[in-house]
Amino acid sequence: MSSLLDTGASLSIIDRNLLHALGGTVTGQTMPVSGLGSAMSYEWCTIPVLIDGRDERGNAIGVECILDVNVLEASAPGLCLGQDFISTYGVTIQARRGITALEVKNRILTFAVHDRLPAPYAKQAELCVLCDVVVPARSQGPGRLRLHEREALVV
């Protein structure tokens, strides 16, 4: 199963349906999660994350990383590994080589980066509007924005 390694996320999250499909159960308490609109965490749980990669000698190896994740309803990537995972396991991204490395039990494990986002279509994004628009702070998309009797989709 693929996951998203998100260097901008403080916490790791898992989709509630994915957690249940994998046989996991939630513990802990519900807490607000900022940065995802008005999302609330459905408690949290500790899960094993199994990673297949290569050791220092190039041998195929799998390691188990134990991680506390916040459980969210309808979390798009399924499993998002944030800074808590990145700092705990000393994750480094070697973009030029197309690999990621992490340290587990004093061993370095590398694995290929499979998915990449395509380059942007424009070097500089432009926003064109027909009327003045005020976007309130902390109103991150996606969603709908009311513009003087019109609605716009915010992505």
Image (cartoon, rainbow, N blue to C red):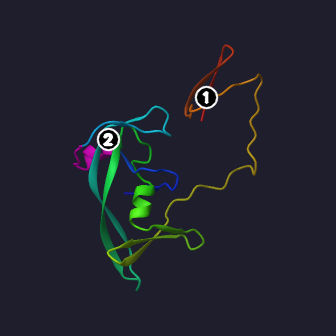
| Residue in front for this viewpoint, 89 or 22 | 89
Left or right of 44 in this view: 126: right
Report the residue at 73% width, 44% height from top: 125
Q: Quadrant of the N terminus?
A: bottom left
Residue 18 lies in the magenta-colored region: yes
Q: Which residue is mark 1?
A: 153
Tell me if residue 47 comes above or below residue 37 in the rendering: below
Disc 2 secondary structure class: helix
The image position of residue 69, as x and y in percent, is 34, 50
The quarter of the displayed image where residue 29 is located: top left
> Among all residues in the image, which is located at the extreme bottom?
57
| Residue in front for this viewpoint, 126 or 91 | 91
* Cα gap from disc 1 to disc 2, whole angstroms: 26 Å
User: Which amino acid does the dot numbered 2 rest on?
Assistant: Arg
Q: Earlier in the sequence, mark 1 or mark 2?
A: 2
The image position of residue 41, as x and y in percent, is 36, 38
Pointer 1 with pointer 2, Cβ within 8 A: no
Tell me if residue 83 comes above or below residue 155 in the rendering: below
Residue 97 lies in the magenta-colored region: no
Q: Which residue is mark 2?
A: 16
Q: Which residues are magenta?
A: 16-27
Q: Quadrant of the C terminus?
A: top right
Report the residue at 62% width, 55% height from top: 118
User: Which amino acid does the dot numbered 1 rest on?
Assistant: Leu
